[in-house]
Image (cartoon, grey):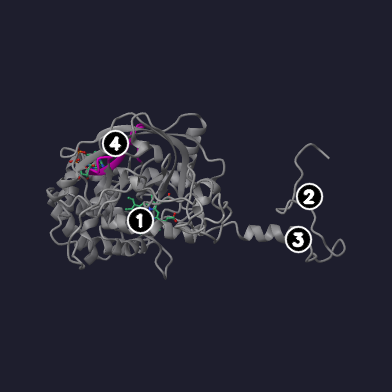
Amino acid sequence: MSDRPRMTTSAGAPVPDNQNSQTAGPRGPVLLQDYQLIEKLAHQNRERIPERVVHAKGWGAHGTLTITGDISRYTRAKALQPGARTPLIARFSTVAGELGAADAERDVRGFALKFYTDEGNWDLVGNNTPVFFVRDPLKFPDFIHTQKRHPRTNLRSKTAMWDFWSQSPESLHQITILFSDRGLPVAPMFMNGYGSHTFSLWNDQGERFWVKFHFKTMQGHKHYTNAEAEKIVGESRETYQEELFGTIERGEYPRWKMQVQIMPEADAEKTSYNPFDLTKVWPHAEYPPIDVGVLELDRNADNYFAEIEQVAFSPSNVVPGIGFSPDKMLQARVFSYADAHRYRLGTHYEALPVNAPKVPVHHYHKDGAMRFFPNNPNPDAYYEPNSFGGPVEDKSVQEPPLKISGDADRYNHREGNDDYGQPRALWELFDEGQKQRLYDNYAAAMEGVPDEIIERQLMHFGRIHPDYADGVRQARARLAGKAKDSISDGESSPAAAE
Ligand code: NDP
Ligand code: HEM
């Protein structure tokens, strides 16, 4: 025998032959007792787990957050103190595509971070955009259905997308970003990341501050036009994986500058917009970004499945000094992610190495799938309170109280909310070339959608600015003209995705 390790079954018994099944005679049927064959086939059948219901296609790596600034007066979080270095894992993703989707598709990108802090895991599960399509979580499943496949055709439906958006003007800010240049980054390191929601920071004096987290790319922004992306996807569907993995493998480590915007707790009553509305940003002029540190990715996963597919990010994971806010969307996400993980990965998914905190974990959850971790040191301490030295609560890490008032009701979130001002501010930042590409991208995405839906959407664009709506109208006319020309030239017309 060579000095290579001896192959075994998963029960550890040596394997005599991994080339030939056990059969009755050389031509005969296989024997049921060939457990090794059965085990191999059975394992293969279980190699897939449910893909994430959204953000299924992703790319990730390990790295570090280094704090270079000083925000210690706002938060007691150890990971945010000057000089702190915290290991992390990042996963980037597209939202709508399935596990095998092409990378270079126009879509919002997920920007999820798990910081393994000395006080437990802190997850920031954000996007490459500072805002979102909806502001009430009741609309999230409907919105996602319009992005996924039509139940009958099993195709993505442009009609469903525009039908929903044109009846949900709170989406205007996000779609202006999605159809702008930044809606199709070249690779994860060429885009910003945003915590998007308003979170809170709190300090040892019991003071609370509202906070927005930003991660600014230090590689510069790079994006594809639709035409470039079509060509790229034709050549490779895996460009993000190739770029991110390759860059890190070559020792060129991507970096992001971490910034926060801080709002004193009482200011939330004074701003002209609801600071907990996920469709709004806080203007930089009012709440200037403060440099906090640098995030660097410097290590690829050794096993994509174990580390990137099984990683479980949840906005519910906060640590002392960092908290939630009244943002309704955030509140729903605090529930939704851990629920998804129990279904997608199993009850004790947090015991998987990639999800396990790097600090001792002491809880009283008991049995269930994946219960392989040990008991508390004293096995009699398996409930709480107990008299056997089991772990106890620590009141010193309790967040300061938050005053909340109001009558329970279903408040119309579209009433008294300006859905047009901030998209207008963004559109005004675009130069003429950016505006034209925005209009062209819309026109392409609207092909084949019924006129009454388009008109409803154009009405909203017109409320942002009449030139915005006119730009899209003209781009649609140009596209229709091109399609007519190509038909009269004898070419076949492009198949609509409807
Ligand atoms: P500022 O001029 O101070 O900031 C403009 C921001 O817009 C910068 O953060 C810039 O990001 C970002 N930006 C530039 N081009 C695009 C684009 N195509 N898609 C998305 N973001 C882009 O303005 P305000 O703070 O007053 O905000 C004006 C508008 O800028 C907002 O309505 C919002 O749409 C957008 N914005 C604002 C952010 C905020 O937190 N205030 C964050 C991101 C966007 P970068 O610095 O990386 O170039
Ligand atoms: C993934 C729900 C809004 C960013 C997911 C998953 C669920 C979910 C169930 C799959 C989780 C998993 O299986 O691991 C929701 C709900 C939302 C919402 C219910 C609103 C009510 C948002 C918003 C953002 C966001 C606003 C960004 C600001 C992400 C990211 C992932 C994700 C980045 C992928 C995380 C990863 O890489 O594993 N979402 N989501 N989601 N969501 Fe959301």
CB under 8 Å between discs 1 and 2:
no
Q: Quadrant of the C terminus?
A: bottom left
| Residue located beneath label 2 in the image | 14
How crowded pointer 3 is (Cα within 10 Å; few <14, some 14-19, many 20+) is rated as few
| Residue located beneath label 1 in the image | 334
Amino acid identity at mark 2: Pro
Q: Position of residue 460 (x, y in %)?
A: 17, 57
Which portion, as a residue range, is magenta? 203-223
Dot 2: element: loop
| Residue located beneath label 3 in the image | 35
Tag 3 or tag 1, which sits nearer the N-term?
3
| Residue located beneath label 4 in the image | 259
Tag 4 or tag 3, which sits nearer the N-term?
3
Ligand 1 falls in quadrant: top left
Dot 4: element: strand
In the foreground, 298 or 21: 298
Q: Residue drawn 75% across and 49% down?
A: 8
Tag 3 or tag 2, which sits nearer the N-term?
2
Q: CA distance from mark 4 to mark 1?
A: 23 Å
Amino acid identity at mark 1: Val
Q: Quadrant of the N terminus?
A: top right
